[in-house]
Amino acid sequence: MGAGESSQDRSKWWQHNFGLEVSLALGLQYPARFTPYGELVVGLGALHHNIYNKDFIDFAYSVGIEAGLEVYLTGHLHLAAAFGWRRSLVNAGAGTFYADSWTVSVGFGL
């Protein structure tokens, strides 16, 4: 997963603020036509920010839970919906900062 800011007035792409994270999900599900599942999600990453043309990179991590349902229509074609919560933490020079987020996802698979 990645995110970045494009609105900053910087001459080089690496001077923009951005973050990168890799997530691992471990879960349980009951395989059937209606497949409920629950997951524990752990993420590790880094945030880059440029302040007065000085680069700073901070360690970031997140933990969360997610629950959802997959509905198989025919063969492998299925619809999915999930709801979850995630706490993201950043270890910066002044301490550890965190933010809580609610997540909602919908999708389909082949």
Image (cartoon, grey):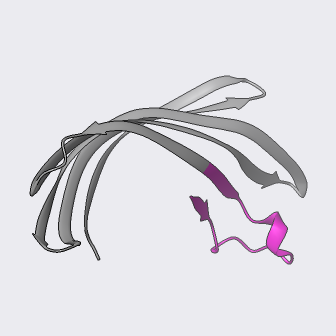
- Residue 75 at x, y = what percent? 17, 74
Q: Quadrant of the N terminus?
A: bottom right
| Residue drawn at 20 percent across, 61 percent down | 80
Whether residue 76 is visible, yes or no, is yes
Q: Relative to 71, does residue 45 appear above or below in the rendering? A: above
Q: Image point 61% across, 49% down: which residue?
A: 22
Please state the horizontal and vertical placement of residue 25, each as a whole percent of the image: 45, 41
Residue at 19% across, 48% down: 31
Region of the chain picked out in magenta, as a range: 1-21
Left or right: residue 17 compared with residue 34: right
Considering the image in quadrants, where does the C terminus appear?
A: bottom left
- Relative image position of residue 15 (x, y in whole percent): 82, 65
Residue 88 in sight here: no
Reply yes or no: does residue 20 show up in magenta: yes
Residue 75 vs residue 88: left or right?
Answer: left
Count of numbered badges drawn on the protein: 0
Residue 67's place in the image compared with 104, above or below, is above
The answer to which of 76 and 48 lies nearer the viewer is 76
- Above or below, comparing residue 67 to residue 3 in the picture: above
The residue depicted at 35 percent of the width and 37 percent of the height is 27
Residue 98 position within the rendered picture, expressed as x and y whole percent measured from the top left = 52, 30
